[in-house]
Image (tube, rainbow, N blue to C red):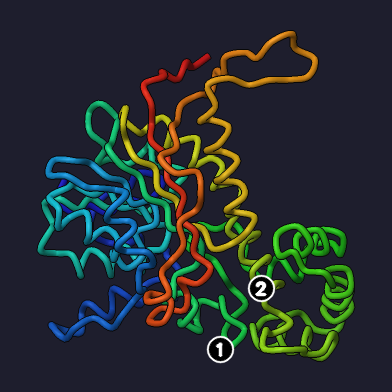
Amino acid sequence: MPCVAIADATGLHGHDVPQQEDARFSMAERREEQGTAPLPPYHLPVLPAEIDEWMNAQPGDAIIDGTLGGGGHTALFLEKGATVLGIDRDPEAIHYATHRLRSFSEKLHTYQANYSQMREHPGLPASGKVQGILLDLGVSSHQLDCAERGFSFQKDGPLDMRMGPNAVMTAADFVNDSSEQEICQVLREWGEEPQARRIARLIVDRRAKQPFTRTSDLAQCIENSIGRHGRTHPATRTFQAIRMRVNEELSLLHDALEAALHCLAPGGRLLVITFHSLEDRMVKQFMQHRAKPFIDDPTWPAPRSNPEHFLDLPTRKAISASSAEIATNPRARSAKLRVALRNCQPIRTP
């Protein structure tokens, strides 16, 4: 395997993204070909000081960065002498981070896949175990700022929202083909949208006349229907819910957390940054359950040993950004970091 390898989830290796890839996912490659001019900012990592402290990367450590993005967090680990196994489903992120961190090429191994597939990373040590795993959830600043990706209602673009070219549907597919009931359920459960039923009805009525193809069209229809009150755009929760559905974010997060248990060596650190209450609740409950030595039930005569006691919690509270960081990076305002340590309890496979 070359020092820096890019592989997709099917196991393709090499430095090039597959030719069948959607054109909108190849902009970072074109940017690299422009010469030696500095790359434009891709994504400002949140909680860098806290991540650096809690990961405590050491020379010789192997660390999985399951959401490579622009490589901001990965750079912290590489500078400490660790080897980083970077994962991202977005080929733009892979290209950008690989170019940005090219001076660490011998210690950076990338894999184009979803973080739930971390156990398949071709750069894993022979033991299959690493000393740290970081998951920085949500959408990157670059994805939001790039109108062609269709994540933002503030910039007109195709109604896409795929984090990677292998997603099975686009946002346009979802709003134009899903039933009113499914749209309502997704907006209510994933976007916590109080007017989910009304918006779902609006989408179904309007698409019967003309399908949705642009972000501005969908956002404007929602605003015209329910009005605008306060600073938050009325389409905010709808766009968030659709993005999470298109990219299967909650189900893949659950799979990634389970995979992390298998990949962490005893004493290994699991760090997860969330920006959404549903994600944070899932991470919190996952960690807390697996940090209980015993579990109890009112119908049991006594507590029982927890067969899933695989983690210890060095801190039970979520860690938030400082006021100084929020002043320079407003995106950090909603960030929550949770930390867990892998204990020595073996995972018994059936």
Foreground pick, 197 / 205: 197
Give coordinates of residue 57: x percent, y percent.
21, 47
Which residue does the image show at 22% across and 63% down from the upper left? 98
Residue 192 placement (x, y as % from top left): 74, 64
Q: Residue at x 69, y 67 (%)?
A: 173
Residue 338 x, y percent position in the rendering: 46, 49
Q: Which residue is mark 1?
A: 155
Q: Is residue 258 left or right of residue 18?
A: right
Tell me if 86 is positioned left or right of 194 in this view. left
For label 2, the crowd category at 10 Å Cα-Cα, with few meaning under 14, some 14 to 19 and many 20 or more, is many
- Give neighbour class at mark 1: few <14, some 14-19, many 20+ (Cα, 10 Å): some
Q: Earlier in the sequence, mark 1 or mark 2?
A: 1
Which quadrant holds residue 10? top left
Residue at left offset 42%, top offset 65%:
21
- The residue sitting at the top extreme is 301
Badge number at residue 281: none
Mark-to-mark CA distance, 1 and 2: 13 Å
Give the image location of residue 290, x and y in percent.
53, 30
Q: Which mark is residue 239?
A: 2
Q: Quadrant of residue 261?
A: top left
Query: Closer to the camera, 247 or 12?
Result: 247
Residue at 66% x, 73% y is 239
* Quadrant the N terminus occupies: top left
Which amino acid type corresponds to the residue marked 1 in the rendered image? Lys
Instruction: Name the secondary structure under disc 1.
Output: loop
- State whether residue 255 is above or below residue 113: above
